[in-house]
Image (cartoon, rainbow, N blue to C red):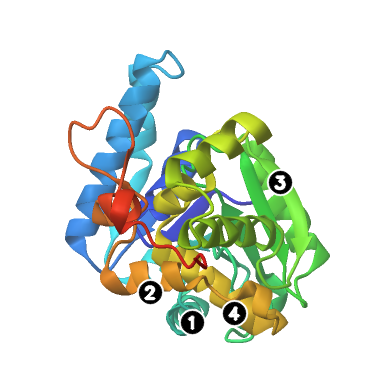
Amino acid sequence: MITNISVIGAGIMGNGIAHVFAENGYSVTLVDLNEEVLKNAIRTIEKNLSRQVSKGLITETQKHVALGRIVTQTNLATGVNVADLVVEAATEDLQLKLKIFQKIDEGAPIDAILSTNTSSISVTKIAKSTKRPDRVIGMHFMNPVPVMRLVEIVNGYRTAKEVTEIIADLAKRINKVPCIVNDYPGFIANRLLMPMINEAIYSVQQGVAGVREIDTIMKLGMAHPMGPLQLADFIGLDTCRAIMLVLFDGFGDSKYAPCPLLTNMVNAGYLGVKSGEGFYLYRPGNKEAIVSPRLSGDRAPSFRES
């Protein structure tokens, strides 16, 4: 039975995952090497819980009880030593995840389930770095975690059926909808989403249409709640590029190669919301999305032939 959950990484995804588990009655240890990141994570969770209170979704008492279920820890071994389930939510970097899983495997109880929130990296490859590959699985939460109901559950090649069933049931217990997929590059969510985003970026690069026009077409014509370029900004353009490279490497097909404009923006440090600028500008006080001046008017990239 799962009661104690350790979440590794206190960034946007990690603090969202900790929030959801704590809100639904689980004891959570939030682990990060950086004490300041942990403090910021707790502040974010408190702010998001307060927003739920203001909307009447939970009571003030429930908010304080949820916060009381979360403890923080900077030592990974200590942070996982009583865990029934570990959820890794570190940066989308294979070598980093392999190192983390080796340490988790050493520190967590032998019967603990180890999961990764990876959005594209092979769960089978991650599991191979442990002595319990049958108890390693993917739990791909969507951002923002407290709002989005989907959890893409990814079976590694050696994941035990029992583990899949336990994690699918757990997802339901935290009011999420589990969708079980197998371990191929990008799984389903990003195998479909990222090529669409990449193609939207190609459309900007080639001067087919402007940033706002592309997003508006997909919102109004395809009923998407957010256009692909704005969504890319929220995901992080560096993360989008990393996922495209996983797809490209996994399938060996040029259609998955990251758009040159995407690569240029990442190399220049324009990563979207987290850097303050991507396809749109993100400035305090902005009431509506403003297209980056680098991608509008005379400065807009275009490879169109004259």
Secondary structure type for disc 3: strand
Secondary structure type for disc 1: helix
Please, which residue is most extreme toward the top here? Answer: 56
Q: Which residue is mark 2?
A: 77
Front: mark 2 or 3: 3
Q: Nearer the viewer, residue 205 or 159?
A: 205
Q: Quadrant of residue 115?
A: bottom right
Disc 2 and disc 3: Cα gap in Å? 29 Å
Please, which residue is most extreme toward the front here? Answer: 306
Q: Which residue is mark 3?
A: 178
Secondary structure type for disc 2: helix
Front: mark 4 or 1: 4
Quick one: label 4 or label 1, which is nearer the N terminus? 1
**Circles 1, 2 touching at the beta carbon (< 8 Å):** yes
Residue drawn at x 78%, y 69% is 160
Residue 183 image point, x, y percent? 73, 71
Q: Nearer the viewer, residue 251 or 217?
A: 217
Quick one: label 2 or label 4, which is nearer the N terminus? 2
Q: Which residue is mark 4?
A: 126
Front: mark 1 or 3: 3
Quick one: label 3 or label 4, which is nearer the N terminus? 4
Residue 107 image point, x, y percent? 45, 76
Above or below, 233 relative to 124? above
